[in-house]
Image (cartoon, coloured by chain):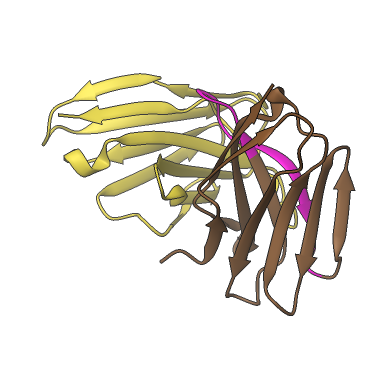
Chain colours: A yellow, B brown
Amino acid sequence: DAGITQSPRHKVTETGTPVTLRCHQTENHRYMYWYRQDPGHGLRLIHYSYGVKDTDKGEVSDGYSVSRSKTEDFLLTLESATSSQTSVYFCAISWAEGRSYEQYFGPGTRLTVT
Amino acid sequence: QQQVKQSPQSLIVQKGGIPIINCAYENTAFDYFPWYQQFPGKGPALLIAIRPDVSEKKEGRFTISFNKSAKQFSLHIMDSQPGDSATYFCAAETSGSRLTFGEGTQLTVNP
């Protein structure tokens, strides 16, 4: 599992409420990623980080923010959840430039926004 | 905007058959082309990857064929087994250490 945990694993929330998902790694990898997985869309990158306090947007970043204050933790926040953000969210890590095609994924968080 | 197109969406084969999953891309700046395998309830896992200067790569029963001029690549699974039933994603590595994934193919191998 490359030492990646995600919490919570399941969450049901109401439209308009803030939600924070946590990704924790134990192996000091530099790169961390947040994806969402939806039927027919594969995995789409939301945000990624290439170091503490260094983050950048992916292809579906609207409505999401991230923070990385420690190497081991990468937080994804939905400031005001909407039903379109119902999805399975995966965190991933890779350990070096030049091998970022080799990503290790966490177990996922299933988020339902009612 | 999906930069990697994958087909088919779903595929059913008999045990021992050779399923083939195809992907096409537009961006010639892609550096690496990995395939990921995902079982239900799990995160995707890297299966095999190929560089654009190589036409074929084999790892066990899994083979990637790469056609640079056509901007296409495919995954072949030799002697497929029921345990290969999973969702398969192709991807392409872009600059900035990011991956762009295809839409996924749900493979079912019947006994």
Answer whether residue B107 is visible to the viewer in this image: yes
Q: Residue at x 22, y 44 (%)?
A: A84
Q: Residue furthest bottom?
A: B69
Vertical comparison of A55 with A81: above or below:
below
Rendering quarter of residue B60: top right
Relative placement, left or right, of A16 versus B111 is: left
Evaluate whether residue A97 shows in this view: no
Q: Residue at x 36, y 30 (%)?
A: A21
Residue B26's x, y, as percent?
A: 57, 75
Q: Is residue B44 magenta?
A: yes
The residue under the point 75% across, 74% down is: B68
Residue situated in front as seen by the camera: A51 or B52: B52
* The residue stretch that appears in magenta: B37-52
Q: Is A25 or B23 nearer to us in this picture?
A: B23
Spot occupied by residue B90 in the image (x, y as percentages of width and height)? 62, 52
Q: Where does residue A109 sit, x and y in percent of width and height?
A: 40, 27
B59 vs A10, left or right, is: right
- Quarter occupied by the C terminus of chain A: top left
- Residue A85, located in which quarter of the rendered image? top left
At 36% from the left and 55% from the top, the residue drawn is A60
Q: Is residue B59 left or right of residue B44?
A: right
Specify the quadrant that holds the N terminus of chain A.
top right
A3 vs B57, left or right, is left
User: Is residue B96 a member of the stretch shown in magenta?
Assistant: no
Q: How many marks?
A: 0
Q: Position of residue A50 (x, y in %)?
A: 57, 51
Quarter occupied by residue A111: top left
